[in-house]
Image (spheres, rainbow, N blue to C red):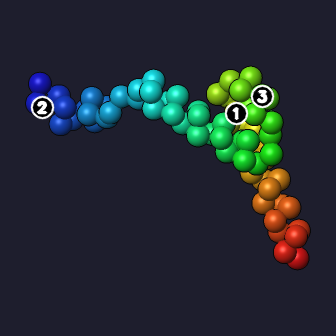
Amino acid sequence: MAILTQRNKSYRRPKKSGAAKRRRTLVQRRRLVALGMSEDTAQKLNHKEIRARLKTLTKEAARTRRAASA
């Protein structure tokens, strides 16, 4: 067994846990609310929608910061 774990690194990688995923999703929801989305709307999104919205809202926030500083 020891030789197998030396050659195959995938056996040594830590497993993703459900608790960590829920924690990440909660943090990302809070970021959406901080960026201006209503809390009720953020609660209704699934994890794929949350990540997609975070990408677009973060880009928009950066654009508005750049426009305000110029």
Gap between marks 2 and 3, in whole Å?
52 Å
The quarter of the rendered structure image containing the N terminus is top left
Q: Position of residue 23 (x, y in %)?
A: 51, 34
Outermost residue, bottom side? 70
Gap between marks 2 and 1, in whole Å?
42 Å
Residue 9: image tag: none
Which residue appears at 83% of the width and 61% of the height? 63
Q: Amino acid at mark 3?
A: Asp
Along the line of sight, the residue nearer the viewer: 67 or 32: 32
Kindly check if marks 1 and 3 are in contact, taking CB atoms under 8 A apart as contact: no
- Residue 58 shown left or right of residue 24 in the figure: right
Q: Which residue is mark 1?
A: 50
Q: Mark 2, mark 3: which one is toward the viewer? A: 3
Gap between marks 1 and 3, in whole Å?
13 Å
For mark 1, give the secondary structure: helix
For mark 2, give the secondary structure: helix
Q: Earlier in the sequence, mark 2 or mark 3?
A: 2
Q: Amino acid at mark 1?
A: Ile
Residue 38 occupies quadrant? top right
Along the line of sight, the residue nearer the viewer: 38 or 24: 38
The quarter of the rendered structure image containing the C terminus is bottom right
| 6 shown above or below 40 | below
Q: Amino acid at mark 2?
A: Ile
Residue 42 occupies quadrant? top right
Q: Which residue is mark 2?
A: 3
Which residue appears at 27% of the width and 29% of the height? 11
Kindly check if marks 2 and 1 are in contact, taking CB atoms under 8 A apart as contact: no
Q: Which residue is mark 3?
A: 40
Q: Earlier in the sequence, mark 1 or mark 3?
A: 3
